[in-house]
C-alpha cells in the first residue's frame, strides 16, 4: 500500500492516477474487479477510466453509468455518486433484487470521489470484503482524490505557463516591430529634415522644420513608452525580496524632481518583485506627481496598514472624481505634452506582479495610487 501511495502522489496524468489506484485495490485488497469511473459533466456520464480484474467479460465490457432512471444499475451507481457517501454491499440480493438480477456481482464497495467520479470494487461472491479491506479502500480513495486534484492543478498551471509564454512571445514580437520598423523610417525622416534645415535660409521654412523636429521628438518618446509597455506588460516570472524604501528612493534620484519632497514611511517593508520594473513604477508615479502637483509637491510612500499593499500619494491638485477609473487608460492625459502612457505603464507593472492598481484622493486632497494584493509585503 505504501508503494502504491507513493506512485499515486507521483502520477502525472489523470489516467495514470486512476490506473495506479485500481491496481492497488486489485493487488492489496485482492479485489476481483476494481474500477474508477470518471465523471464527464458534458455528457453527464460516469465513464470507465481504469479497470482491472477478471469480471469485465461477465459485464459485457467496461460499463458506463448514465443518469438514467429506467436503468436500475445506472440508477444504483448514480445514487451513490450524487449522495456523496460510500455504499458497502455485503450481498446485492439483500440490497436490491432487481440489480442482483442484472449484475453478476454479489458484493462490492462504491466510493464517490466528490465530483471526480466513483471508485468501485466488486466480487462474484457475497461478503467478499471485510473491515480491513474497507479501511484500505478508504486510504486508496482518499489518496486518489488528492492525486486527482494535484494533477488538475498542475495541468491548469502548465496551461497558464504556456499561455504566458505565448503572450510574452507576442509582446517581444511587438517590441521588435516598434523598435525596428518605426525607428528606421523616423531616423531617415529626421536626417532629411536636418539636411533641409542646414540648406534653407527662409525663416518660414525653418519654422516648419523646427515643428517637424518637435514632432520627431514626440514620436521618439512615444516609441520609448511603447517599448516600455511591451516590456512591462509581461508577467513577472523571477522575483527577489526588495526593500520598498530603497527602491523608491533610487527611483526618486533618477528623475527630475525640481523642489519636490519625498517622504518614505516604510523603511522595513519588503516585497517580492522585479527590481527594474518596480523602480519604473515608482518613477512614473513620481513624475506624475511632480508634473500635476507642482514643483514643490510632497510625495508620500507608505504601507496600507491591514490591507496587503502600499501607496504613493501627493498633496497636489488631485484627480477629478469622474476620472478615477480612467487615469490608467492608454489615451488619458491632462497635459499637452503627455503621451498618456505613464499611468498605463504603472498598471501593467502592477498586474505583471499580480497586484491591482487603483487611483483615489489622498488625505491632503491630492492624488493617491494604491497597489493592493501584495501578499508578499512584510
Image: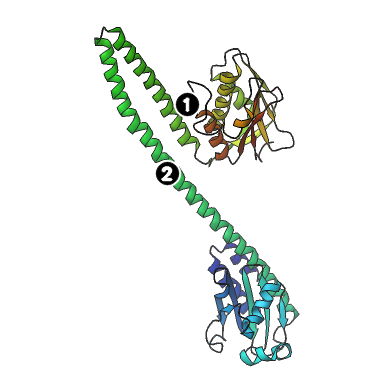
Q: Position of residue 86 (x, y in %)?
A: 71, 75
Residue at 34% x, 28% y is 183
* Quarter of the rendering occupied by the N terminus: bottom right
Instruction: Tell me the SS state at disc 2.
Output: helix
Report which residue position mark 1 lands on: 339
On the image, which quarter does residue 230 sit in?
Answer: top left
- In the rendered view, would you say 273 is above or below 25? above
Report which residue position mark 2 lands on: 169
Q: Position of residue 77 (x, y in %)?
A: 65, 79
* Quarter of the rendering occupied by the C terminus: top right
Residue 5 or residue 303, whichever sits in front: 303
On the image, which quarter does residue 366 sit in?
Answer: top right
Q: Position of residue 330 (x, y in %)?
A: 50, 33
Closer to us: mark 1 or mark 2? Answer: 1
Left or right for 337, reference 270: left
Instruction: Tell me the SS state at disc 1.
Output: loop
Left or right for 68, reference 191: right
The earlier-in-sequence mark between 1 and 2 is 2
| Any part of residue 87 in sight | yes
Amino acid at each position: 500500500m505504501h508503494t502504491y501511495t507513493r506512485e499515486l502522489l507521483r502520477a502525472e496524468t489523470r489516467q495514470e492516477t486512476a490506473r495506479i489506484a485500481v491496481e492497488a485495490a486489485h493487488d492489496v485488497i485482492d479485489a476481483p474487479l476494481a474500477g474508477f469511473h470518471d465523471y464527464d459533466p458534458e455528457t453527464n456520464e460516469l465513464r470507465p477510466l481504469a479497470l482491472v480484474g477478471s469480471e469485465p467479460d461477465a459485464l459485457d465490457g467496461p460499463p458506463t453509468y448514465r443518469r438514467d432512471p429506467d436503468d436500475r444499475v445506472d440508477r444504483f451507481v448514480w445514487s451513490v455518486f450524487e449522495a456523496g457517501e460510500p455504499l458497502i454491499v455485503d450481498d446485492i440480493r439483500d440490497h436490491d433484487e432487481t440489480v442482483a438480477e442484472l449484475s453478476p456481482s454479489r458484493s462490492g464497495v462504491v466510493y464517490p470521489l466528490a465530483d471526480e467520479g466513483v471508485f468501485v470494487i466488486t466480487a462474484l461472491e457475497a461478503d467478499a470484503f471485510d473491515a480491513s479491506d474497507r479501511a484500505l479502500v478508504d486510504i486508496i480513495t482518499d489518496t486518489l482524490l488528492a492525486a486527482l486534484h494535484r494533477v488538475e492543478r498542475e495541468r491548469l498551471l502548465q496551461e497558464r505557463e504556456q499561455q504566458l509564454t505565448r503572450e510574452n512571445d507576442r509582446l517581444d514580437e511587438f517590441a521588435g516591430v516598434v523598435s525596428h520598423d518605426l525607428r528606421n523610417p523616423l531616423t531617415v525622416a529626421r536626417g532629411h529634415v536636418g539636411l533641409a534645415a542646414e540648406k534653407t535660409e527662409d525663416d518660414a521654412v525653418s519654422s516648419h522644420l523646427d515643428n517637424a523636429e518637435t514632432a520627431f521628438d514626440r514620436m521618439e518618446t512615444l516609441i520609448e513608452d511603447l517599448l516600455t509597455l511591451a516590456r512591462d506588460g509581461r508577467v513577472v516570472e523571477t522575483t527577489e525580496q526588495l526593500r520598498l524604501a530603497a527602491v523608491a528612493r533610487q527611483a526618486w534620484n533618477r528623475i527630475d524632481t525640481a523642489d519636490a519632497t519625498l517622504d518614505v514611511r516604510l523603511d522595513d517593508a519588503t516585497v517580492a518583485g522585479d527590481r527594474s520594473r518596480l523602480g519604473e513604477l515608482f518613477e512614473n508615479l513620481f513624475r506624475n506627481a511632480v508634473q500635476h502637483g507642482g514643483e514643490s509637491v510632497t510625495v508620500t510612500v507608505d504601507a496600507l496598514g491591514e490591507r496587503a499593499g502600499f501607496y504613493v500619494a501627493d498633496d497636489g491638485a488631485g484627480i477629478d472624481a469622474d476620472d478615477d477609473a480612467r487615469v490608467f487608460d492608454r489615451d488619458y492625459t491632462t497635459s499637452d505634452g503627455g503621451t498618456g502612457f505613464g499611468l498605463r505603464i504603472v498598471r501593467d507593472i502592477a498586474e505583471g506582479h499580480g497586484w491591482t492598481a487603483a487611483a483615489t484622493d489622498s488625505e491632503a486632497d491630492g492624488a493617491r495610487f494604491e497597489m493592493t494584493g501584495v501578499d508578499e509585503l512584510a
